Image: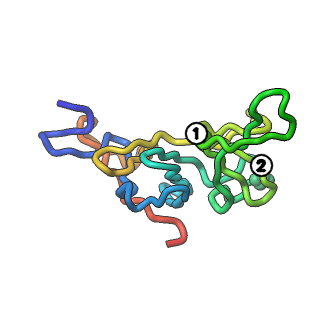
Amino acid sequence: MESGERGGAPRPDAGMIDVGGLDEFPERSVRVFSIEGREVGVMRWRGDEVFAFHNRCPHQGGPLCRGFFGPKLVSRGPGVPGRLEADDDLPIVVCPWHKWEFEAATGRGVWDPNYRVRTYPIKIEEGRVLLGMRVPRRDKPRDADAPAEAKAPAEAGA
Ligand code: FES
């Protein structure tokens, strides 16, 4: 039996929450979900690249998902001062309050990797976006072999 299946019926992995179909996430945008009292931003960058991170800036708690998203600006080697290029392989989240930047994939601060936004596991299976968050103990079924039921997440601001 493959992971994520029980009795032949496909289901998300235990602890993975189905937050919607991939087609419900426009490219280069973020949707915010409120799950178990925590706001989580789900960003679709391009194609099937998705990232999930806490909607709270580690600087002073700014609403990260209300910020800006774009490719990281990088310098392309010595000898060409001032030449910057956009690296589409490195999407960046910019906090709206003081413009600190974080890598969407790792949550690391661009200027100081000691600052980090919490990220969450996320994947796409059969066109569905599955977010990995620990299911609180009170929501776990008594039967340890039974699959954990993921509550339908509420989209923040919806
Ligand atoms: S609160 Fe995000 S940069 Fe200051």
Q: Is mark 1 within 8 Å of ligand 1?
A: no
Q: Quadrant of residue 104?
A: top right
Label disc, if present, on residue 89 of the rendered structure = 1
- Seen from this angle, which residue lies furthest bottom? 158
- Where is mark 2, residue-wise? 100
Task: Give the secondary structure at mark 2.
Answer: loop
Image position, residue 23 (x, y; %): 38, 59
Q: Amino acid at mark 2?
A: Trp
Against 4, is 92 above or below?
below
Q: Is mark 2 within 8 Å of ligand 1?
A: yes
Task: Give the secondary structure at mark 1.
Answer: strand
Q: Quadrant of residue 73?
A: top right
Front of the two marks 2 and 1? 1
Is residue 60 something that shows in the picture? no
Against 158, is 18 above or below?
above
Residue at 71 percent of width and 42 percent of height: 85
Residue at 49 percent of width and 52 percent of height: 44
Image position, residue 115 (x, y; %): 74, 38
Answer with mark 2 or mark 1, whichever residue precedes in sequence.
1
